[in-house]
Image: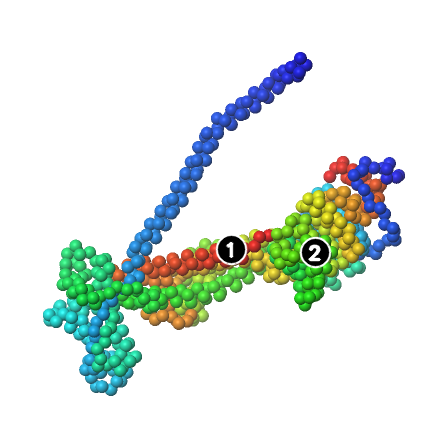
Amino acid sequence: MTNSTVNEPTPLKQASKDRAQHASDAVKNGLKRRYAAEARFKAYGIGAIALALTVVGILFTTIISNGLPAFTETTLELEIELSEDVIDPSRTRDPGTLARANYRKVVFDALLTEFPDVKSRADKRKLRSMLSRGASFQVQKLVVDDPGLIGQRINFVVPVSSDFDLYEKGVINKDVANADRRVSDQQMVWHDTLKERGMITTSFNTTFFTSADSREPELAGIWGAVSGSFFTMIVTLLLSFPIGVAAAVYLEEFAPKNRITQIIEVNINNLAAVPSIVYGLLGLAVFINFFGLPRSAPLVGGMVLALMTLPTIIIASRAALKAVPPSIREAALGLGASRMQVVSHHVLPLAMPGILTGTIIGMAQALGETAPLLMIGMVAFIVDIPGGITDPATALPVQVYLWADSTERAFVARTSAAIMVLLAFLILMNALAVLLRKKFERRW
Amino acid sequence: MTEATTNSMTTVMPPAPDATTEPRRVKYSTKNVDVFYGAKQALFDVSLDIHEYEVTALIGPSGCGKSTYLRSLNRMNDTIDICRVTGSIELDGIDVYSDEIDVVHLRARVGMVFQKPNPFPKTIFENVAYGPRIHGIATSKSEIDAIVEDSLTKAGLWKEVKDRLDEAGTGLSGGQQQRLCIARAIAVQPEVILMDEPCSALDPIATARIEELIDELRNNFSIVIVTHSMQQAARVSQRTAFFHLGDLVEVGETGKIFTTPDDQKTQDYITGRFG
């Protein structure tokens, strides 16, 4: 009996019980709505990722499908008679004469022997357009290097002109009216005849990876731009990494926290947001016009890109230094390490993964940068492969820009192929960043 | 008053008074120390002597300035831009804030162990060898090996780690890490070791191990320890200083502070009435 009186609900207890029941009901009723909200949020997230992946997928598909034809080249194997009468009528073997000889005729004669019925000037011109201008240069080089070949008949592989290259790859649409087509019906017949005779072959396009730019698409390659980019990046790295890290270490570890360092910090953040073309103008005004450095050179390009990359490196390095726990600094200081020793023995090694990641991201940004290079003349048409940082050069993204601007149909594929090479380098650099971070990562 | 009558602190067992009661030499002499963080004053006119080969415990509620005081002894407060110290802090009669003593040299003479174990993310060997190496105390491999073994032995860690000296110091357990930090501090062969709540992140067993260690280290070093645990102060220290709100309220032999404190505030604190 006493028990029941104890358990009997007093009005106050009953009220609190009711409240608890009410709260419990409220939670229960709301649950469905809460889970629905969560499910919706997840769906949005998946949708966003799917959209992003689709866009990336479309981008890569277009670039790769456009660019793949550029990785093969069509060549024509001809039996060329290196006639002494044409090349060196005076028989002096004078290098000047050899270099100036009419090799176009030498090569064209070889092609003409395949089609003896071509007589008219118009037909001959049409037939000649099958050959790349590069063909005569290649024969010229062969003869100049080895004059002993004169008088012999040699089998020689020459590139075909870009139109026939495209025809061979099936890019030229046969349904287009004859007059509007780059390759006429007659030329198609010639091409097919040569192909039947087994003289036309398709192989991996080494030209594309070994030559510099050219007016003729079939002779144009990216190696000049790749080496230009390489020299530019070397200059950028050598300048921006030490300066950026030193600035970050000073600001983060040594500088007093006062108004001046605050202003410097704000300005570094502002510099990161300055449009890159402004850096190009600065490079033009200061490096080229004032200091008289060579234009179109990787040296100046690298310096300009270093300026552009510096804020990125400084900001990333400062963040990495900030992330090193203060307890490590205290431990080293407490042992009597000087501030320099604390930084160089402990803080910097621990911050290195972050610093390297920031640097590589900055370098990747610089590698893809076009605008500042336009201002300092790296947009020039350069047919020589640069051999150093003061030679005229262009860079990969600028090469993409130049080719995208060209009228020849065959540059479309080369533009996409150059983009693929650029993307490959960027992916490589990002992979390197991940690898370095993994390697140096240490727990504390 | 006898111990039995005084004491509500039955849990605290003050150590038996030293057989040698002759006063120890003064190692650190601090007079009228004020410490400011910007405009805020954290320590008010603290005058305190630290004796050689003794453990001095600094106790008091959180925010009372005991860590601040400890960190002014080896000038770790220098790393805080807004921190300012006035008064005199003399180590063997030389003011540590004067030009006569270099801060790097000072910290080599005065080691420090922190609240959270903070071994370097390097091997156990490197952790201990780092101090002697940067100070040029040892240069040859054999000398460094000897110092590492000696320090780890003194820190009571040698047996546990001797077969894995090239493993990461951060891979040890919390208590082992703290003993590694102590080994690292004594490898530099300092005269004084400052400990800032060295056991607060450790379990009771690891704490007991460190306390034993502190008791052994007393033979070779002068030790100042900040602690929140009054039992710990009573167990390990010979002298205790009680701080409250930036003031040094009372300092004296540990036995006396925990049995017959002069000040009412000390009495209240050690009996658990506040803090």
Residue at 25% over, 70% down: A158
Height in image: A356 above or below A22?
A: below
Quadrant of the snapshot with the N terminus of chain B: top right
Residue at 59% over, 18% down: A14
Q: Amino acid at mark 2?
A: Trp
**Left or right of A48: which side holds A341?**
right
Q: Disc 1 sits on a residue from what chain?
A: A
Labels 2 and 1 within one chain: no
Most extreme residue toward the top is A1
Q: Residues within 10 Å of mark 1 (few under 14, many from 20)?
A: few
Residue at 71% over, 63% down: B146
- For the residues labelled 2 and 1, the Cα–Cα distance comes to 32 Å
Identify the residue position indicated by label 1 in the image: A438
Q: Disc 2 sits on a residue from what chain?
A: B
**Left or right of A305: which side holds A338?**
right
- The answer to whether residue B174 shows anywhere in this view is yes
Quadrant in which residue A50 is drawn: top left
Which numbered tag is attached to residue B158?
A: 2
Quadrant in which residue A183 is drawn: bottom left
Height in image: A47 above or below A361?
A: above
Quadrant in which residue A93 is drawn: bottom left
**Which of label 2 and label 1 is nearer to you?**
2
Q: Residues within 10 Å of mark 2 (few under 14, many from 20)?
A: some
Residue at 70% over, 47% down: B206
Height in image: A64 above or below A78?
A: above
Nearest the eye: A283 or A12:
A12
What kind of element bears circle 2? helix
Q: Amino acid at mark 1?
A: Lys
- Where residue B271 appears, as percent x and y from the top left, is 78, 37
**Left or right of B102: which side holds A383?**
left
- Where residue A276 appears, as percent x and y from the top left, is 42, 58
